[in-house]
Image (spheres, rainbow, N blue to C red):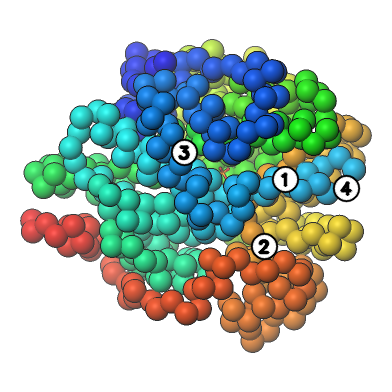
Amino acid sequence: MYYLSTRNSAVRVLSSQAIATGISEDGGLFVPEKIPELTLEEIGSLGKMSYRERAFLVLSKFLTDFSEDEIYYCVDGAYSSGSFDTENIMELVRLGEQSYMLELWHGPTCAFKDMALQILPYLLTSSVKKLGVDKKVVILVATSGDTGKAALEGFKDVPGTSIMVFYPAEGVSSMQKLQMTTQDGENVFVCAIEGNFDDAQTGVKKIFVDRSVGEILSENGMMFSSANSINWGRLVPQIIYYVSSYAELVKRGDISLGERINICVPTGNFGNILAAYYAKRMGVPVNKLICASNSNNVLTDFINTGVYDRNRQFYTTISPSMDILISSNLERLIYILSGMNDEYVKELYASLSKTGRFEVSDEIKSLLKAEFDCGFCSDWETMMAIRSVYEKHSYTMDTHTAVAQRVYEDYLKRTGDRTKTVIASTASPYKFSSSVLKALGKNVEGLDEFGLTCELESACGMPVPKALSELRSKSVRFSGSIQKEDMEKAVLGFLGINK
Ligand SMILES: *Cc1c(COP(=O)(O)O)cnc(C)c1O
């Protein structure tokens, strides 16, 4: 199977090339030319399997240029090393009559990004090897919080790789900062930038596209690659847990094989919900995909009207991983819904970069309406959702999951739809202790990160994840900050290259 660029369907590459390069040279994203299908029997039979076996089956449908051994190697490395705090890798918790929390935060950094970033290093190094490139892969990441830590945990001490993470000195939470600055591993480097997230992001992109830096790396037997969510290697592992959830519900007897479910996802870059769409297209019986946003509701407007318009106020919310106005992975959906019309996608994205806006055709508008429902909520409504679920079900959600919960409740009121629904739970509440405690009406004054987690532990009764409590005894390895102009120097210095 080949992968095509959303902006030039004539670009056809194997999955290993798509993963190794991350993005197409024309700026497009790689999309499989055909979506492989699973029969209902196949999906049902997954119920008896472990997460690793399910992962193997789904990945082998997409990564057709990988050998069985190569896929086993990747799956084993990611999902059996004991870095998840549950054997099941994901948990599906029933909440009331008809909804389920799909907990995707049992990995080493307590956010759903681990589901993909634990396996990406294996997929990436295998891909590079398959292509016969004998180079060390240098991963550069600009992060506003969750991605950086998840990438560090994924790539630490992976042979043949180095990873460098840049974060805005004043732009991450204190827990996120501590998670990164205490990172262990021989091949890691973490650096604060005097500036905001955009400065870090722009700096990283500049280094990426600078041919002279690329040449210096090449001369030294190295190459850059990226771990951000436009890489197919991050999207494909996310399909596994949606297929897996369905099989799990059938196995428990909560649904019959063939019965449809809804999937509701708290959305930022549109990666996680796109994976759910792929699961549906593979054959998982899905009724509606519900796209949940916070006050940065550009996607809600898009699904409702067909107009994508990023010219709007940017809000900083209590669900920061969803504070985003350009949802990169939407490009893949539009490409698919337009019948793989590369010229059309190119036109839309040229308009987006020129005017910050585009409008899709009536045909795509109605396809969107058929597949998706959507909604958004404010910080206040997010907090109320945390509180009411806590009071009703003794279950504690993080702020991102709570956005999805609230949007789902609104959907229920509006539609009366009794379809069983899986809600993607994307972070442990302990990652956002302060907001969660405030939502529960607790006093947080004067408490540091560890004081907050202790307080939350006594409120919710669930133990603090070891990965977070351990930070207390770890020493800071990466302190201080640099000017954004000095990023290139920092990169070459870390790699031991004299320009
Ligand atoms: C990244 C993230 C999201 C958004 O996921 P997308 O794939 O970008 O839509 C939601 N919740 C949490 C906790 C995240 O870290």
* Residue under pointer 1: 92
Q: Judge from the rendering whether residue 378 lies leftward or rightward of residue 28; answer left or right.
A: right
Q: Give the amino acid type for the residue marked by disc 3 in the picture.
A: Val
Q: Quadrant of the N terminus?
A: top left
Q: Is residue 170 above or below residue 375?
A: below
Q: Give the amino acid type for the residue marked by disc 2 in the picture.
A: Pro
Residue at mark 3: C-beta within 8 A of ligand 1: no
CA gap, disc 2 to disc 1?
A: 16 Å
Specify which label sits upstream in the sequence, 4 or 2.
4
State the residue at coordinates (53%, 66%).
467
CA gap, disc 4 to disc 3?
A: 33 Å
Q: Judge from the rendering whether residue 291 lies leftward or rightward of residue 179; answer left or right.
A: right
Q: Nearer the viewer, mark 4 or mark 1?
A: 1
Specify which label sits upstream in the sequence, 3 or 2.
3
SS at mark 4?
Answer: loop
Answer whether residue 388 is visible to the viewer in this image: no
Q: x and y percent of residue 178 in the render?
A: 46, 72
* Residue under pointer 3: 75
Q: Is residue 98 above or below residue 392?
A: above
* Residue under pointer 4: 96
Give the residue furthest to the bottom.
446
State the residue at coordinates (42%, 31%).
71
Quarter holding residue 266: top right
